[in-house]
Amino acid sequence: MSFFVILEQRQGVIKEAAVDVWRTVQHLAQVSGGKEVYGAVMGDVDTDLIKGRCAGKGQVYIVRDKAFHEYAPQAYAGTIVEMIRSTGSENIFLANTAMGRDLAPRVAMRLDAALASNCIVDAESAGVLKAVTTMYAGTVSAVIQGLRNRVVYSLAPRVCRFEEPFPFENKVEVLDAKGVNVSDSIGNPVLKEIIYHTGRKDIAEADIVVAGGRGVGSNENFAMLESLADVLGGAVGASRSAVDDGWRPHADQIGQTGKSIAPKLYIACGISGAPQHLAGITGAETVVAINCDRDAPIFKAADYGIVGDIADVVPQLERAICGFQRVK
Ligand SMILES: Cc1cc2nc3c(=O)[nH]c(=O)nc-3n(C[C@H](O)[C@H](O)[C@H](O)COP(=O)(O)OP(=O)(O)OC[C@H]3O[C@@H](n4cnc5c(N)ncnc54)[C@H](O)[C@@H]3O)c2cc1C
């Protein structure tokens, strides 16, 4: 039984979320009695770059085909499944990113495997894997174990909490995949990729996220949150209402139909705390809520709550943090 990791790349760079999955799988392989680990990178990615990002033991195969430069659902799934079959891997891992959410069920279906999505995986002493995921908009936790011989796990963001330095030495071999049939049917080709350069970290990868909801009131008022995020070195997220109103792009949406995040600090500004929003913040370590309604449900999910108007509270908070940073 070996482990197989699908390493997502964007513009030739292995995504932080994929590195996180790789590290987690290295740990799982070790506690499961030294299972073999295979990885696959689709697209033209520099060999040394992969070696630098993926520490531990195992073999990473690169499928260098220009068809894979951008995510092509059918072709990715077809080629990856062929590689999984040839390695005989039974546990397949990938990050629960936008691409991961699309690819995981395609791969699972073709392999007739079970699918555990947006989960945290642990290995029990006998090497049996146990996945914990949330269901019904985060209101229920489900344990997924031993459903089929093969299981595809899409891992929740930032599940790997190893302190630096990473405890595994680097014995990873990076090889060009040979003899893999690249599917000539790309299916629906990507016509245009729109990339927003915000200069900030992706909310799914950030240590600190400041998010705004309908209570922010307008696109312009998000400048307040951006300013606070700048001071904290964080990213800016949003509730679905703020996205639906066109104040933020969908990439910033947190929740059931947006991204799951797991920052060390999450500051929710003018967000009521609907279950669909809370489903996306179950991994947050500390939650601070700012809301003018003292009965807002977000306070039940918060570690610290501030009842007040965000137009007063957010600038005060920023000044206090700046003052604290100066004193330090
Ligand atoms: C199938 C489905 C999927 C969904 N997926 C998601 C999802 O992924 N993410 C998501 O977020 N939602 C999702 N939703 C929508 C969700 O149910 C809520 O409607 C949404 O989260 C509400 O957004 P909000 O908290 O910004 O707005 P509201 O619920 O309108 O809350 C605004 C809050 O701001 C406060 N406020 C107003 N003015 C101020 C002020 N000046 N200062 C301080 N506080 C103020 C108010 O007291 C209120 O609590 C989904 C819904 C469905 C049905």
Image (spheres, grey):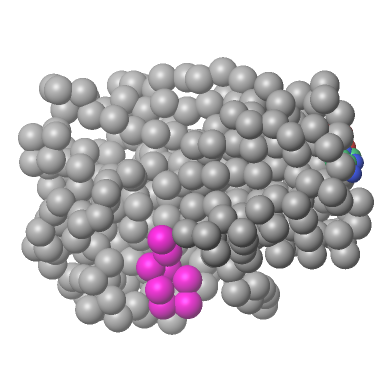
Whole-percent x, y for residue 190 in the image: 62, 72
Furthest residue in direction front, as rendered = 327
Regarding residue 279, the answer to whether it shows in the image is no
- Image side of residue 126 versus residue 241, left or right: left
Give the x, y percent position of residue 220: 88, 64
In this picture, which residue range is highlighted in magenta?
9-16
Horizontally, residue 310 falls left or right of residue 35, namely: right
**What residue do we see at 78% from left, 60% from top?**
224
Residue 54 in sight here:
yes
Q: Position of residue 48 (x, y in %)?
A: 22, 79
Q: Nearer the viewer, residue 318 or 14?
A: 318
Quadrant of residue 303 within the rendered picture:
top right
The x and y percentages for residue 201 are 54, 64
Q: Is residue 14 magenta?
A: yes
Note whether 44 is above or below 215 in the view shown.
Answer: below
* The magenta stretch spans residue 266: no
Residue drawn at the location 33% of the way across and 45% of the way down: 160
The residue located at (47%, 59%) in the rendering is 328
Determine whether 305 is above or below 210 in the image. Answer: above
Residue at image coords 49%, 52%? 207
- Count of marks overlaid on the render: 0
> Would you place residue 193 above or below residue 244 in this image?
below
Q: Is residue 264 above or below residue 98?
A: above
Tell me: 240 left or right of 84: right
Q: Quadrant of the N terminus?
A: top left
Location of ligand 1 given as a quarter of the image? top right
